[in-house]
Image: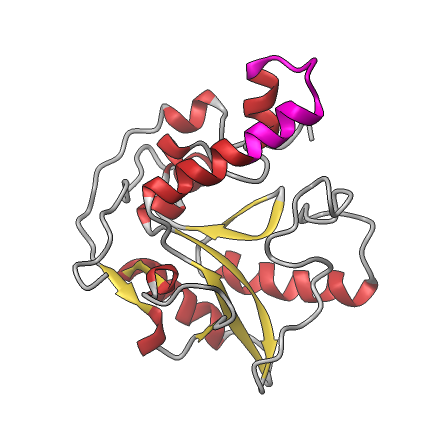
Amino acid sequence: MSDIVLMCDPRVAAIPVRECGEKLVDVRYSRLLVDDSRQDPEGVFAHVREGVLDRLLRAQAALPDGVRLLLAEGYRPPALQEQYFTQYAGELQAANPQWTSDQVRRAASRFVAPPEIAPHTAGAAVDITLADANGHELDLGTSTNATPEESDGACYMNAKNISAKARYHRRILASVLAGAGLVNYPTEWWHWSLGDRYWALMSHSPTAQYGPAAPPPQL
């Protein structure tokens, strides 16, 4: 993991944000598939920034015939991000009482971004996978919410302990999303973002264009 830049890296937080003001849009009105198994009656997770949706549609157009993008989660309210991070960090601390607070924060950020820089709260990130023409999820090695502990590290994009088919599907996903300008968080094969601080650092952009966003008015 030493060569992976984690969300908690000070270089990520140091990226300034120049908010562009794009709205959050509901991807359910687009041609993207949305995972309807999530307990999300208000549809909050189905929102992303306008520019992110545009790039996702470009990526989908580049997929092989019979393959679709399937969105698991986009926007995440800041309070929920805080809850997720605190809960996971608490679980790690309980399992590793000898760890310092910095060690816990670093380990937690492999799976949940620290709330103050989280791309999901900006509407800049998506947890996304592939589906067939009928909307059935393809095998990419793990679920889109598998922790490093429960997956034995198979959640990492370049994990070796996955099947050849899963690795092939990951290559397809990475090819179209990277080709559309999104960047992957290497500890989560499903997490891709555009316009946030992590994207800016990885893309050598001097600024991020999306900062934390309030939920859309209808939610």
Query: Is 134 placed left or right of 72 in the picture?
Result: right
Residue 107 screen position, x and y as percent: 62, 28
Q: Is residue 91 magenta?
A: yes
Taking depth in this image into account, of 19 and 203 the one nearest to the observer is 19
Residue 1: image quadrant is top right
Query: Is 117 placed left or right of 90 in the picture?
Result: left
Taking depth in this image into account, of 51 and 71 the one nearest to the observer is 71
Taking depth in this image into account, of 175 and 145 the one nearest to the observer is 145
Q: Is residue 193 above or below residue 134?
A: above
- Residue at 36% over, 37% down: 205
User: Which part of the image, by quadrant, shows the C terminus?
Assistant: bottom left
Residue 93: image quadrant is top right
Q: Is residue 38 above or below residue 9?
A: below
- Residue at 66% over, 15% down: 99
Residue 50 screen position, x and y as percent: 27, 61
Residue 128 screen position, x and y as percent: 52, 61
State which region is magenta: 88-101
Taking depth in this image into account, of 133 and 28 the one nearest to the observer is 28
